Amino acid sequence: GEDVEQSLFLSVREGDSSVINCTYTDSSSTYLYWYKQEPGAGLQLLTYIFSNMDMKQDQRLTVLLNKKDKHLSLRIADTQTGDSAIYFCAERSRGTYKYIFGTGTRLKVLA
Amino acid sequence: DGGITQSPKYLFRKEGQNVTLSCEQNLNHDAMYWYRQDPGQGLRLIYYSQIVNDFQKGDIAEGYSVSREKKESFPLTVTSAQKNPTAFYLCASTTGGGVNNSPLHFGNGTRLTVT
């Protein structure tokens, strides 16, 4: 069945790069999303990629997709304390209404 | 500004009482969703609606009910049949899940505490 997995925690120093990883199981055409959640708030869309792409860059964010391994990563360059949050990976198969979310990775940025 | 409004932000109820969580959007989105979030478990789908007057059960619909009488509104009722109702509830919407990219847009959530 469909499943999205993420590691639970990541800790980095301010100014370093953060890499948050995600694996998914759907083998059909898929949209993959990254969301950020700050404490007590909803989810904010950061970026997305379609499964026919390998990479997408948006300012400090770089998304890499390895279709063979069904592995998705989000790299945050020059990580700041304001980047501390929970990051969710999600997938949606094309033509469906269902979005599958991972458990979220809690990123802690140390000053 | 367009967006999704969930109210109230915090809600307290006694066990055995039904409670309704509000979700309103002015994004002109067709599809709306309700998710439940518990620590360490990510988001679990309760109900979703692709269009007015139509909705489908998600993965954990037992003990919940919804209605979709207007495009802008998708209220969620947590009934007394829901065994563990204390959680953070998130409402989301999108232009149409089956079409192109259409990411979900989220409200700021309602934290429900039942004692």
Image (spheres, rainbow, N blue to C red):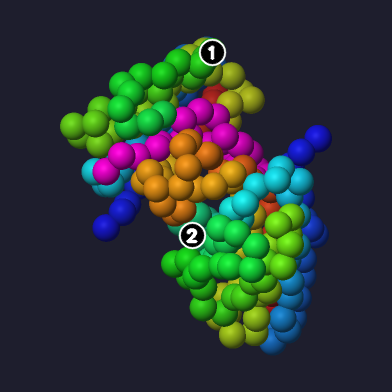
| Residue occupying image coordinates x 61% and y 23% | A81
**Residue A43 within the magenta-colored segment of the rendering:** yes
Tell if the residue under mark 1 belongs to the same chain as the one under mark 2.
Answer: no
**Residue A36 within the magenta-colored segment of the rendering:** yes
Query: Residue A35: x, y in percent?
Result: 53, 37
| Residue occupying image coordinates x 40% and y 23% | A63
Residue A16's label in the rendered image is: none
* Residue A101 vertical placement versus B110 (above, below): above
Depth check: A39 or A61 in front?
A61
* Residue B50 vertical placement versus A25 (above, below): below
Kind of residue at disc 2: Arg
Quadrant where the N terminus of chain B sits is: top right
Quadrant where the C terminus of chain B sits is: bottom right
Q: Bounds of the magenta span? A: A28-48
In the rendered image, is residue B95 in sight? Answer: yes
* Secondary structure of the residue carrying numbered label 2: strand
Q: Left or right of B114: which side holds B47?
A: left
Kind of residue at disc 1: Gln
Q: Which residue is mark 2?
A: B44
Marks 2 and 1: in contact by CB < 8 Å? Answer: no
Query: Residue B92: x, y in percent?
Result: 62, 51
Chain letter, disc 1 residue: A
Q: Which residue is mark 1?
A: A59
Q: Left or right of B103: which side holds B87?
A: right
Chain letter, disc 2 residue: B
| Residue occupying image coordinates x 49% and y 59% | B44
Q: Left or right of A30: which side holds B48?
A: right
